[in-house]
Image: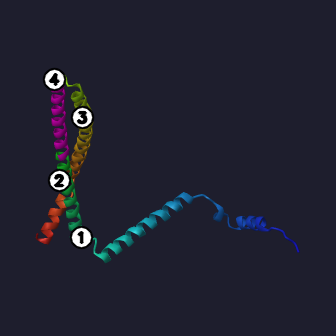
């Protein structure tokens, strides 16, 4: 029994008989056309699914836009509240640092070295808290500005008004 491999011979014969099967010419165009057709079919299927579920109706669009607007408004309010809290924290720690400086100065004037050292340690901790709260304030200022910008740049107001007229709201 012979154990010869005839694959090479069969492949060469197939290449001679069908050269277009093994050619890479125009492959990019075929891939692009297939990808484009698949994307178009996906969009059609997506539209059909949304129509069946009722998610591409005008009412659904109105609800989606109102929900997005509401979320942006709530985010802006939340960040404003957090910014105000950060401002209050900074003010609070500034008052504490000023009070500790006065106490340290009074202890130094009264020549109470132990008490002066206690106020110095508390002052270091309070200054660290003040620095941390100032960093948080800067971060919340950026977040608040970003939330306000997103709310200001919301482009659905016109479409919401059109849909309200359409629904008679």
For marks 4 and 2, the one nearer the N-term is: 2
Residue 157 appears in which quarter of the rendering? bottom left
**CA neighbours of label 3 inside 10 A, class few (<14), some (14 to 19), many (20+):** some
Q: Which residue is mark 2?
A: 77
**CA neighbours of label 1 inside 10 A, class few (<14), some (14 to 19), many (20+):** few
* Picture quarter with the N terminus: bottom right
Q: Residue furthest bottom?
A: 52
Residue 94: say if magenta: yes
**CA neighbours of label 2 inside 10 A, class few (<14), some (14 to 19), many (20+):** some
Residue 24: say if magenta: no
Disc 3 and disc 1 in contact, CB within 8 angstroms: no
Which mark is drawn over residue 42? none
Q: Position of residue 53 (x, y in %)?
A: 31, 76
Front tag of 2 and 3:
3
Vertical placement of 109 versus 11: above or below? above
Query: Image point 22% across, 63% down: which residue?
Result: 67
Q: Which residue is mark 3?
A: 122
For marks 2 and 3, the one nearer the N-term is: 2
Circle 3: element type:
helix
Q: Which residues are magenta?
A: 85-109
Disc 2 and disc 3 in contact, CB within 8 angstroms: no
In three-dimensional space, the C-alpha distance between marks 2 and 1, rounded to whole angstroms, equals 26 Å
Circle 4: element type:
loop
Left or right: where does residue 141 sit relative to residue 37? left
In three-dimensional space, the C-alpha distance between marks 4 and 2, rounded to whole angstroms, equals 50 Å
Q: Which residue is mark 1?
A: 60
For marks 3 and 1, the one nearer the N-term is: 1
Residue 50 appears in which quarter of the rendering? bottom left
Query: Image point 19% across, 38% down: which residue?
Result: 93
For marks 2 and 1, the one nearer the N-term is: 1
């Amino acid at each position: 029994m012979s154990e010869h491999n005839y694959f090479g011979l069969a492949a060469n014969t197939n290449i001679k008989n069908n050269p277009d099967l093994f050619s890479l010419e125009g492959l990019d165009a075929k891939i692009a056309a297939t990808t484009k057709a698949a994307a178009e079919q996906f969009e059609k299927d997506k539209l059909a699914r949304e129509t069946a579920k009722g998610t591409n109706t005008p009412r659904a669009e109105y609800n989606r836009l109102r929900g997005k607007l509401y979320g942006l408004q709530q985010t802006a309010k939340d960040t404003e509240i957090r910014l105000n809290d950060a401002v209050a924290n900074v003010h609070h720690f500034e008052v504490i640092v000023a009070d500790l400086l006065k106490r340290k100065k009074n202890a130094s004037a009264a020549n109470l070295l132990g008490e002066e050292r206690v106020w110095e340690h508390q002052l270091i901790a309070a200054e660290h808290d003040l620095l941390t709260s100032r960093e948080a304030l800067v971060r919340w200022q950026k977040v608040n500005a970003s939330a306000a910008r997103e709310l200001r740049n919301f482009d659905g107001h016109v479409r919401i008004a059109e849909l309200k007229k359409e629904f008679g709201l």
